[in-house]
Amino acid sequence: MNLTDEERSVLSGWSRRRKTAQALALRSRIVLRCADGGSIGEVAADIGVSRNIVSKWRSRFVTDRLEDLSDEPRPGRPRVITDERVDEVITKTLEEAPGQDTHWSTRSMASAAGMSQSAISRIWRAFGLTPHVIETWKLSTDPQFVDKVRDVVGLYLAPPENALVLAVDEKSQMQAIDRTAPILPIMPTTPARMTHDYVRHGTTSLFAASDLSSGSVIAQHYRRHRHQEFLRFLKPHRPDATGCRPVR
């Protein structure tokens, strides 16, 4: 069996390349070994395969050369969902509402389109559709909004020398509740346990600030939510207490 220079180069590449399928690499080695001479039995013994495999791929190469070394298309289940039905699902998802529900689910869409839930899920994944995800935004009507954002961002990125910059937030009317009995810790083979009921201790307000220079968080609870408590929260960390210049 004779090989052209181009065929030998292609077969050598297929037999050595790491990304080549192992079946194709094996067939390439069989053809190369047959081209070097030797009987079918000798080639089978050298490569470690049966005589039938060597005979099969030698004959297929002689008939159709390189094109016949790859696997032929295998029969499979025919496609059930047509492009028109896929387009129908996408149109319903984007343009129609699911009755009284807030958004489509795979179950409701499957019922409306006459498909299975798994089919609807595959279509949504393929086209990046997530009807259950909602993002919100807010547009400011403040004419100086852009200038204010630049001032705040500039202060965060390049604070004045010796200035302490804090990002402050608050959360009021937090319920202070406690379990009626101490929580039992986790033990080997036993999870942590706690009572189902609890005792109310009124409400509390949380003030918290993030130090942008160090990344540390300062937090404190107060019974009331007034400007007096807010100032009391800031005073222990005020810049002028350490010789720093305050910035507002």
Image (cartoon, grey):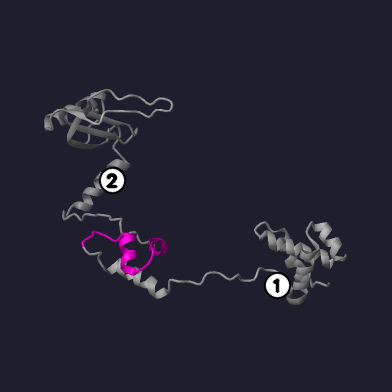
> In this rendering, would 10 be left or right of 101?
right
Give the camera-side residue of 124 and 225: 124
Residue 153 image label: 2
Residue appearing at x 27%, y 30% in the figure: 218
When asked about the image quadrant of residue 237, the answer is: top left
Q: Let me know if residue 97 appears in the view.
A: yes
- Amino acid found under the numbered disc labelled 1: Asp
Residue appearing at x 79%, y 73% in the figure: 4
Name which of mark 2 and mark 1 comes first in the sequence.
Answer: 1
Give the camera-side residue of 111 and 223: 111
Range of magenta residues: 100-127
**Residue 209 image offset from top left, x and y in percent:** 25, 34
> In this rendering, would 115 be left or right of 166?
right
- Amino acid found under the numbered disc labelled 2: Val
When asked about the image quadrant of residue 157, the answer is: top left
* Residue 106 lies in the magenta stretch: yes
Q: Let me know if residue 234 appears in the view.
A: no
What secondary structure is marked by label 1? helix
Residue 152 image label: none
Binning the other alpha carbons within 10 Å of mark 2 as few (below 14), some (14 to 19) or many (20 upward) gives: few
**Residue 78 image offset from top left, x and y in percent:** 51, 72
What secondary structure is marked by label 2? helix
Label 2 – label 1 distance at C-alpha: 65 Å
**Residue 33 image offset from top left, x and y in percent:** 82, 63
Q: Which residue is mark 1?
A: 68
Give the camera-side residue of 30 and 160: 30
